Amino acid sequence: MEQSPLQPTPVGAIRFNTDASKMEYYDGNQWQNLTSDSPEAQTGGTRGIFVGGQTPSNSDVIEYVNIATTGNATDFGNQTTGLSNIATAGSRTRGIIAGGEPATDLIQYITFSSTGNATDFGADLTASTRGAAGASSETRMLIAGGYAPAPTRVNTIGYITIASTGTAAQDFGDLANEVRLFNAGQQVQSSTRGVFGGGSNDTSGTNHIEYVTISTIGNSSDFGDLVTAGMTQKGVSNSTRGVWGGFLTPSVLSTIEYITIATLGNSADFGDLSQTRANLGGSASSPTRGLFRGGQTPTKVNTIDSITILTTGNATDFGDSTETATEGGGTSNGHGGLG
């Protein structure tokens, strides 16, 4: 079943494995079983969504891209209200939008395989929260840090079961290092670990990286340090590597940094964004590619940058967002938390 090295396998390729008697698709790293909830079966490839942000008003827009291709974002639908600084996460089938600015305890969801407006989750966060960070596995979303209620910063981590609409968020534990504001969006994750990097302590950015085991409950543990003590950065990840871009220190930087999620240690330099910018409008990832949307240079831009997660190097142009947004959210049905 080996692929000739002279014929690279395209992401999303499908084959029948005669040894295992199963249909498989190539995720960019390895062949995976093709099931009804695989991104290729659900949406023709990993679908990334970008949500809300400041344009400068709080936007209710939801847009999407097929991460395996390049091109401009397309309208998906709308949130139930205009929000920025939203915590975001996703399973294979469902994207979650939690909290946001103005501070709210609202949880919304979308179904990746369709387009349309977000739906109320039917239960709420434990408090009105803005600026929290999201991370997830296939079954559970974590909501860490933020302001709850503003302007009181919190170090709490809450969680929801993604498939269980109508069930309110519950306490998971606390962030270990300090009380932090993440400026929302998605952090990095594997199917077992959620990893939170950087953030603001109200006076400056921090370089702390800490992690939790998503399937358990408890306080986070120290992972290492970022090279850059920053805030406003967004994360992308596959099952192996987590990558952050869009640092504000308070200088605006083009820096991209990465970690290996299964190990502990400090981040390392990855490369640079195509533009020096911070306060990104969201991020999304597939097993091979990470996308960073929008941000400020200090002028707001609608650029979507692309990186190849398992290499290092500078970001390249992917396409444009439908909005010129900062401080939005984003997720996908193929990020590192989904195995």
Image (cartoon, rainbow, N blue to C red):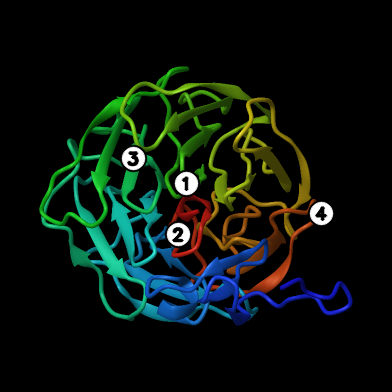
Label 1 Cα neighbours within 10 Å, binned few <14 / some 14-19 / many ≥20: many
Q: What element carries label 1?
A: loop
Residue appearing at x 43%, y 23% in the figure = 220
Label 2 Cα neighbours within 10 Å, binned few <14 / some 14-19 / many ≥20: many
The mark that comes first in sequence, 3 or 2, is 3
Q: In this view, does 165 lie above or below 252?
A: below
Q: Residue 191 carries which label?
A: 1
Q: What element carries label 4?
A: loop
User: Looking at the rendering, in which quadrant would you find the N terminus?
Assistant: bottom right
| Tag 1–tag 3 contact (CB < 8 Å) | no
Q: Is mark 2 on a helix, strand or loop?
A: strand
Query: Comparing marks 1 and 3, which lies closer to the viewer?
Result: 1
Q: Residue furthest front?
A: 19
Report x, y in % for residue 169. Answer: 19, 41
Report x, y in % for residue 150. Answer: 27, 33
Give the residue at mark 2: 331
Report x, y in % for residue 178. Answer: 44, 18
Report x, y in % for residue 6. Answer: 89, 77
The mark that comes first in sequence, 1 or 4, is 1
Residue appearing at x 41%, y 59% in the figure = 53
At label 1, the amino acid type is Ser
| Tag 1–tag 4 contact (CB < 8 Å) | no
Label 3 Cα neighbours within 10 Å, binned few <14 / some 14-19 / many ≥20: many
| Tag 3–tag 2 contact (CB < 8 Å) | no
Give the residue at mark 3: 143
Q: How far apart are marks 1 and 3 (CA)?
A: 16 Å
Q: Distance between the residues labelled 1 and 4?
A: 25 Å
Frontmost residue, 25 versus 94: 25
Q: Distance between the residues labelled 4 and 2?
A: 22 Å
At label 2, the amino acid type is Thr
Give the residue at mark 4: 313
The mark that comes first in sequence, 4 or 3, is 3
